[in-house]
Each structure stands twice: as structure tokens, then as C-alpha cells.
Amino acid sequence: MNIYMDYQATTPCDKRVVEEMLPYFTEKFGNPHSGHGMGLEANGAVDVARKKIADLIKANDLREIIFTSGATESNNLAIKGAVHYYKSDRKKVITSTIEHKCVLETCRSLQSEGYQVVFAPVLGNGIVDMDFLKKEIDDNTILVSIMSVNNEIGTIQPIKEISKLCREHGILFHTDAAQAVGKVEVDAGDVDLMSISGHKIYGPKGVGALYVRIKPRIRLTPLFSGGGQERGIRSGTLPVPLCVGLGKACEIAKNEMVQESRRLTEMKNYFIDKILSRLEKVYLNGDRERRIPGCLNFSFEGVEGESIMLGMPEVCVSSGSACTSASLEPSYVLKAISIREDLAHCSLRIGLGRFTTFDEVEYVSDKIIETVTRLRSMSPLW
Ligand SMILES: *Cc1c(COP(=O)(O)O)cnc(C)c1O
């Protein structure tokens, strides 16, 4: 038996998404860039998908949606692409200390090319320090890249406020919205560039999108040389079934977001209240209110996250983030919100999602309480 509560790592593909994709593997297999009937059929399907993505993020124009292989590529393309295109004028990039690894590493690679990168700190609640941002944003800044929702602690960043700051200074604004799209309202009108991932929103793995504003037109130096597809921004034959799947995932998310969010909020509140009332010395990491309902992150004093996971092998949760849990280093996100070093090793991320049932919430919360209590009773330090 497996109980899946790791929806920030990935999500299952919704069966309705798979259904929609299937014909594009077999009968409708045309190359969307071919001029004949089958090419046009495939291209039409890709544009329908583009429209569904645009509708979910409130983009005005289909051409603003560029398909990629996922949010990792979208983030690389947005940040490197913009910086390399606009480098003659300015030299500085601002991001935050709690971005996804792919943004942090992209920025580090720019540093080694000689650009100045500023990593803005976050406050104890996991929200970016706006006073710091205000001080750092200047006429030498090319781009600000701040994620919409954090993947470890679920906190929602003040995107509208940051957008206003950037606009006042004529600075490009990119947001990694992989954890936000389909879960909270996002508005492409607030940003110049926005990254999306298929497999975080019940779509297929291996596809994502980058929103690239057209009015005013944002230019990017492409990562790949090739046939000039996707307005010359991203060459390569489009994976039509994956594009169709991402579109369908966005359509479902748009239709069901309000209801789903209400259901998840109920489960989240029940989960938090139960854990905090039944165990002592447990801390919820990240702001309690300004977070997406599907992401919980607790520190259980005196017990390592890894040990809790080993104690309930049928429950799929994460200690630290999936990318770093192979190492013994505590999560850099938890370090960034300045929780005690020992507590950073004692954390568990629990992700609730579309297919989580109330019974599973009951089972997993009981299991955690039982496991933590047992481990603490065996610990000489406790
Ligand atoms: C998962 C994730 C990514 C990477 O997305 P892929 O589509 O797997 O490349 C980037 N940023 C955030 C916030 C994520 O959660």
C-alpha cells in the first residue's frame, strides 16, 4: 500500500488528461510544423492547448505561450535568455534565497559569467523581504526573478507588489509559477515572464511553458539553435500529445480550482490542528495564512524527518526537499527562514492534492503522531 502525500514533488496525470492526449500519439501524429492536412490538425490542437493555458494565467494572446520541456527549462530560458539579450544596458539580477534549485543554479552560472546576482533574503514566515528588494532594485538591474509559491513551505509571495516595484523602475519581472498555477489565482498581467510545469498540475511530465509578454515585447536569446519554432524562442518539434495534455490540465484546473482549494483548505486546517494539539514541540514552517493549502511543512523537535519517514514506509512524504534529501545538509529553504539548525533536520513536507481523501488525512496524521511519539520515547535526548 502507498499513500501519496507528496504533491509538490509531482502529481499523477489526471485520467481526463491522458484520454485527451491519446489520439495524438497514434492517429493524429502529424508534425505541427508541416503544411499539409495532418500538420494543420496537429497545429490546431496545439493552439487549442495554448488557449487553455493562456486562459488559466490570464494571458491575452496565444503567441505569448511558448512550450518547453518543463519549468526547469522555462526558468533557464527566461533568466539566461533575458539577461543575455538585454546585457548591454545593465548587469544585475535579483532573485531570492528560497528559489527552486534550477533558478539558483541558473543565477550562479550567470555570476560565473560576470553578472552581479543578489539573493534577497526572506523573513521568518517565508515571505521575501520587501524592504531589501526596494533597496536593491536600481537602474543597473536587468531582471527580478521571484517564485510565486515556494515548493517546500508553500508560502505565497507578494507578486503584485513586486510587479509594481519592477514597473516603476522599468525592470523585467520573471516568476517561477510551477507551484502556483492551478492552485491560486495567477495573473500574467503582473509579470513579463512566467514559468509553468505540466507534472505539478496533473499534466504529463516532460512539458511546461513559458509565458513571454508581447505588449511590450520581451525578447529572449534562445537556449537552442534550430528551426526557429515558437517565435524563434524555442526551436524543436513540439511534442503534440504533451502540449495537448498540458492544455487539458490547465482547463481542468481553471474549472475546479475554487472547489478544490476549499476542500484542501478544510483538510489542511484539520491536519494542522490535529498535529499541533496532539504533539508538543511541533512547529509549522512558513506563514500559516499566506500559503497554498496543499503544502504543509512541520518540524518535530527531537526526531529527524528521515526517521519519521522510515517509521511509516507506506506514506509518501518528503523530508527536506526531494532534490536535497539525498544529502545530509538541511534544506536551504528552512535555513533561509532562520529556524533552529536542529529543527531543520526534523522537518517533514506533506503535500495534499486532487486525489487526497479525508480518510488518508486521518490515517497519515495518526501515523505521524504515533511514529513521532514512539521515536521520542526511545530517544535519550528527549
Ligand atoms: C518542480 C518545480 C520546478 C521544476 O519543474 P520541472 O517541470 O520538473 O522541470 C521548478 N520550480 C518549482 C517551484 C518547482 O516546484
Image (cartoon, rainbow, N blue to C red):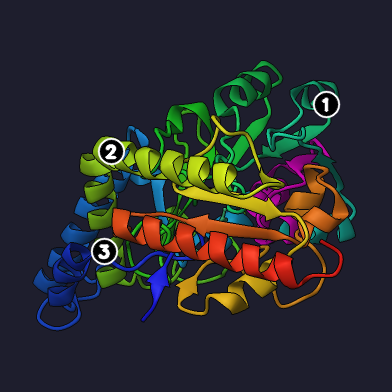
Q: For the residue carrying disc 1, how many other residues have a C-alpha within 10 Å: few (<14), some (14-19), or many (20+)?
A: few
Q: Say if mark 1 contacts mark 2, CB within 8 Å.
A: no
x, y (%) of residue 94? 77, 39
Classify 245 as above or below 218: below
Question: Horizontally, is 266 left or right of 251 in the view?
Answer: right
Q: For the residue carrying disc 3, how many other residues have a C-alpha within 10 Å: few (<14), some (14-19), or many (20+)?
A: many
Q: CA distance from mark 3 to mark 2?
A: 15 Å
The part of the image, by quadrant, that contains residue 140 is: top right
x, y (%) of residue 345? 77, 62
Classify 128 as above or below 197: above
Badge 3 marks a residue whose secondary structure is helix
Question: Horizontally, is 70 left or right of 110 in the view?
Answer: left
The part of the image, by quadrant, that contains residue 105 is: bottom right
For marks 3 and 1 on the same chain, the one whose residue lies earlier in the sequence: 1
The part of the image, by quadrant, that contains residue 88 is: top right
Q: Could you say which disc has been placed on residue 245 in the image?
A: 3
Q: Splitting the image into four quadrants, where does ligand 1 fall?
A: bottom right
Nearest the viewer among 159 and 302 is 302
Q: How many marks?
A: 3
Q: Is mark 1 within 8 Å of ligand 1?
A: no
The region drawn magenta spans 79-105
Residue 145 at least partly seen: yes
For marks 3 and 2 on the same chain, the one whose residue lies earlier in the sequence: 2
Can residue 48 be found in the magenta stretch? Answer: no
Quarter in which the N terminus is drawn: bottom left
- Write down the residue under mark 2: 55
For the residues carrying marks 1 and 2, which lies nearer the camera in this image? 1
Q: Say if mark 3 contacts mark 2, CB within 8 Å.
A: no
Q: Amino acid at mark 2?
A: Asp
x, y (%) of residue 157? 60, 33
- Write down the residue under mark 1: 132
Q: Amino acid at mark 3?
A: Gly
